[in-house]
């Protein structure tokens, strides 16, 4: 009797393991296809007990819009008319950006300030930069220590235009362009939208171009 019970428990364990492997196999394919993740660099851990006897040949998955590739998150597993909410953990190995030296507050960051290292991305703070190009020419709003991961919460864009600065304003219509001058009412960087006060007193909103001009489209 004990032997039968042992084999029954073993059968249940093997069945659960097969189901879990089946889920993970489908999830691996999903993340590789939809998010271009290299299956050699990430590992999926399932935190939700799996429903028994729910093996699906062509499952579908739905993720929340705020999925950021790393850590703990929820996913909807759909198999025909059946569905199940799963809580997963995604352990990801990859490259990220740290400070190569102390970067003092207010520095316009250059490539030599940065270093790329390899590690567990799911253990990093939210908003950690993964590419140098996303950090270069930004300004840090606090001191950053050597080998500290750099996040988007530590930086801002470099202000091409500063508040009260005299600026060139290009007002563009369907078949005309008017060039004028005015005063910036806020700080802003390239491609950012700011408000400016024209010489005639009118306040308009425009986008800063690469030449430091404010483009107003009517």
Image (cartoon, grey):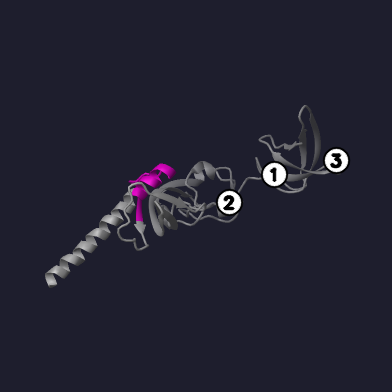
Q: Is residue 73 above or below residue 35?
A: below
Mark in front: 1 vs 3:
1
Question: 10 Å neighbourhood of mark 1: few (<14), some, or many (≥20)?
Answer: some
Q: Which residues are magenta?
A: 26-44
Where is mark 1, residue-wise? 193
State the residue lying farthest toward the front: 81
Question: 10 Å neighbourhood of mark 2: few (<14), some, or many (≥20)?
Answer: many
In what element is the residue under mark 3? loop
Q: Is residue 196 magenta?
A: no
Q: Taking the image as drawn, is residue 41 in sight? A: no
In what element is the residue under mark 2? strand
In what element is the residue under mark 1? strand
Locate the N terminus and report the quarter of the image it occupies.
bottom left
Q: Earlier in the sequence, mark 1 or mark 2?
A: 2
Q: Taking the image as drawn, is residue 167 in sight? A: yes
| Nearer to us in this view, 28 or 23 | 23
Identified at 66% across, 35% down, the residue is 210
Q: Earlier in the sequence, mark 1 or mark 3?
A: 1
Kindly identify which numbered label has been placed on residue 98: none
Where is mark 2, residue-wise? 155
Kindly identify which numbered label has been placed on residue 199: 3
**Which corner quadrant of the image does residue 105 belong to?**
bottom right
Image marks 2 and 3: residues in contact by CB distance under 8 Å = no
Identified at 32% across, 47% down, the residue is 57
State the residue lying farthest toward the top: 175
Looking at the picture, how far across and down is residue 152, in whole percent? 55, 51
- Find the distance from the CA under tag 1 to the CA under tag 2: 18 Å
Mark in front: 1 vs 2:
1
- Find the distance from the CA under tag 2 to the CA under tag 3: 33 Å
């Amino acid at each position: 009797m004990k032997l039968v019970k042992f084999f029954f428990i073993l059968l249940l364990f093997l069945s659960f393991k097969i189901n879990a492997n089946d889920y993970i196999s489908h999830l691996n394919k999903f993340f590789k296809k939809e998010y271009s993740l290299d299956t050699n660099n990430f590992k999926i851990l399932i935190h939700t007990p799996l429903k028994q006897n729910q093996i699906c040949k062509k499952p579908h998955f739905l993720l929340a819009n705020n999925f950021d590739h790393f850590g703990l998150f929820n996913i909807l597993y759909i198999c025909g008319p059946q569905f199940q909410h799963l809580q997963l953990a995604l352990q990801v190995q990859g490259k990220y950006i740290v400070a190569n030296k102390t970067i003092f507050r207010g520095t316009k960051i250059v490539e030599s300030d940065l270093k790329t290292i390899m590690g567990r991305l799911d253990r990093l703070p939210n908003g950690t930069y993964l590419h140098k190009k996303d950090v270069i020419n930004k300004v840090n709003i606090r001191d950053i220590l050597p080998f500290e991961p750099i996040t988007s919460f530590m930086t801002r864009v470099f202000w091409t235009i500063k508040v009260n600065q005299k600026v060139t304003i290009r007002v563009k219509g369907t078949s005309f362009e008017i060039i004028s001058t005015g005063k910036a009412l806020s700080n802003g960087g390239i491609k950012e939208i700011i408000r400016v006060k024209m010489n005639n007193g009118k306040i308009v909103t425009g986008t800063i171009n690469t030449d430091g001009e404010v483009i107003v489209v009517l």
